[in-house]
């Protein structure tokens, strides 16, 4: 679904004798003022808003996608770059070759690149960054990608050879994600608060709880092509405040805004552009598989059967979403429709609870982060669960509390969250992951997938993986979100579709 194209405003002057004279004076004045107008500089600042504030500015150290929304391709760079069409191009790598078995990848690096601190970028930085990702201390959420690198060779300062244990057809995409940023050893430890990268922007200020300001780095190799001199990123979680900030002009761009209810007002105004695009995100009701009685698959299936996904999409996202039945979305390689494996069936939900020996009411808690889709969707789900004898106590928590308590300490029963990374199905094989799922069957299947490079065979195995986690009801898989971006009509270079959550500031400018 796409938004209607916004046409430029056309002006009609009703000419009377007196009006014609006035109009002639105006036009003459405009012509006289033309040289001065041409001399005025193009606008070079921007205010962009986000729903959540990140806990830090090092995407290799935390799971929050808000980190990459600020830093990826802006402060830090990667070997490759992912576009809004999911296509991969070179960034700090100018070219590459791969062996037929996809186990040996050779990258030729861009020359003349420097970090913000003046240090040169070389193959040694690639080796350091990727080896750092698999150390015992690393909290990189994509650690398995780097653990698959058996050896990293640096034959010269501008060549890197990655020798993999298993051939990886997704490697180029994964090397363009924020977890694969390339850093300088001298500053890596303090990147969370004092980020140093090779990107076109530097951190100017961080007003905790309010905004982050980035300023163009004049030492960037293509600084003349970067149109925005300064970008302020404001944090606004309340949906009404998000809409108000756009309508007042306090915010120029709001990607992934919660403005579905107010969409017509923006679509009908020539002051705004509305972009409606797809994603690879999965919104789920996560369940703590380690907690009783959620460790019983019958209870998890009962919870899933009690949920009407279409009603959740209406309540959480005002209808902007597609139902899913597994941790995978339409359009992804190897996708199969698994929605009928766990259909909405309240009678079945009650029967499953009875089979599991659960005497109603079952008391559970649901911790919800501050995102509007989670707060609104959680209310809908709690009401649905109540109809089958499951009483849910909702606890609204701030984002930092969710990251530390739910994701970090696993101190929860249920939670609603969107996983936005496109290649994270391997989370089901991650030991000690926050939803507590452990399955020898899945681990063996995932090992097979990782060792398979032929697309047809790999896609078939991905189908099996989707069916397995659906049958196991590790989570209640709800919907694939459709993202809405509202912006000033004069802003150019925005993404419509978002395979990864980034704000590519160097591509943005004002008309």
Image (spheres, rainbow, N blue to C red):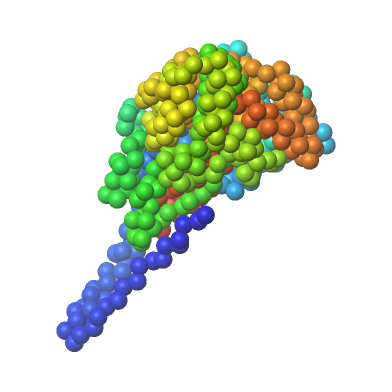
**Residue drawn at (23%, 75%) of the image:** 26
Q: Position of residue 94 (x, y in %)?
A: 66, 41
**Residue drawn at (78%, 40%) of the image:** 456
The count of marks equals: 0
Q: Residue furthest right?
A: 100
* Residue 211 placement: quadrant: top left
**Residue drawn at (71%, 36%) of the image:** 463
Q: Quadrant of the C terminus?
A: bottom left
* Residue 465 placement: quadrant: top right
Depth check, front residue: 89 or 438: 438
- Judge from the rendering whether residue 43 lies leftward or rightward of residue 150; answer left or right: left
Depth check, front residue: 116 or 78: 78
Q: Residue furthest left?
A: 18
* Residue 428 placement: quadrant: top right
Q: Position of residue 23 (x, y in %)?
A: 23, 78
**Residue drawn at (63%, 38%) of the image:** 340
Depth check, front residue: 486 or 191: 486
Q: Is residue 509 above or below residue 477?
A: below
Q: Residue furthest bottom?
A: 17
Q: Is residue 508 above or below residue 58?
A: below
Q: Residue 427: tell me if it is visible.
A: no
Q: Residue 286: tell me if it is visible.
A: yes
Q: Position of residue 179 (x, y in %)?
A: 57, 29
Q: Position of residue 289 (x, y in %)?
A: 56, 18
């Amino acid at each position: 679904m796409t938004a209607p194209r916004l046409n430029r405003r056309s002006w009609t002057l009703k000419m009377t004798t007196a009006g014609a004279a006035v109009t002639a004076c105006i036009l003459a004045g405009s012509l006289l003022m033309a040289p001065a107008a041409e001399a005025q500089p193009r606008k070079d600042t921007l205010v962009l808003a986000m729903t959540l504030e990140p806990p830090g500015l090092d995407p290799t150290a935390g799971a929050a996608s808000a980190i990459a929304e600020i830093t990826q391709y802006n402060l830090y760079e990667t070997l490759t770059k992912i576009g809004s069409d999911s296509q991969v191009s070179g960034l700090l790598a100018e070219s590459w070759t791969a062996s037929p078995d996809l186990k040996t990848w050779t990258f030729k690096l861009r020359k003349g690149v420097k970090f913000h601190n003046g240090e040169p970028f070389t193959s040694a930085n690639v080796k350091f960054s990727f080896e750092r990702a698999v150390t015992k201390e690393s909290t990189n959420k994509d650690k398995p990608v780097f653990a698959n690198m058996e050896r990293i060779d640096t034959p010269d300062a501008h060549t890197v050879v990655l020798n993999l244990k298993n051939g990886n057809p997704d490697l180029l995409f994964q090397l363009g994600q924020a977890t694969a940023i390339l850093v300088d050893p001298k500053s890596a430890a303090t990147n969370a608060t004092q980020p140093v990268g090779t990107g076109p922007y530097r951190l100017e200020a961080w007003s905790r709880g309010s905004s982050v300001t980035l300023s163009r780095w004049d030492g960037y190799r293509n600084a003349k092509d970067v149109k925005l001199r300064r970008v302020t990123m404001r944090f606004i979680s309340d949906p009404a405040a998000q809409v108000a900030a756009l309508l007042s002009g306090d915010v120029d761009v709001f990607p992934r805004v919660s403005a579905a209810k107010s969409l017509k007002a923006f679509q009908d105004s020539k002051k705004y552009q509305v972009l409606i695009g797809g994603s690879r995100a999965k919104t789920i009701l996560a369940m703590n598989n380690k907690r009783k009685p959620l460790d019983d698959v019958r209870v998890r299936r009962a919870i899933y059967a009690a949920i009407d996904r279409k009603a959740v999409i209406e309540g959480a996202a005002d209808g902007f979403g597609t139902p899913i039945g597994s941790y995978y979305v339409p359009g992804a390689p190897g996708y199969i429709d698994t929605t009928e494996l766990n259909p909405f069936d309240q009678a079945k939900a009650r029967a499953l609870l009875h089979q599991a020996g659960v005497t109603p009411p079952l008391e559970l808690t649901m911790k919800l982060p501050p995102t509007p889709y989670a707060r609104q969707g959680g209310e809908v789900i709690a009401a649905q669960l109540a109809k089958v004898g499951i009483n849910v106590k909702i606890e609204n928590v701030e984002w930092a509390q969710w990251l530390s308590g739910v994701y970090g300490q696993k101190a929860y029963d249920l939670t609603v969250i969107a996983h936005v990374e496109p290649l994270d199905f391997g989370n089901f094989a991650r030991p000690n992951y926050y939803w507590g799922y452990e399955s020898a069957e899945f681990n063996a299947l995932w090992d097979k997938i990782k060792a398979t490079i032929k697309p047809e065979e790999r896609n078939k195995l991905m189908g099996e993986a989707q069916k397995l986690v659906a049958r196991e009801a590790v989570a209640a898989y709800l919907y694939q979100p459709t993202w809405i971006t509202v912006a000033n009509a004069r802003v150019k270079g925005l993404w419509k579709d978002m395979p990864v959550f980034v704000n590519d500031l160097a591509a943005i400018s004002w008309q």
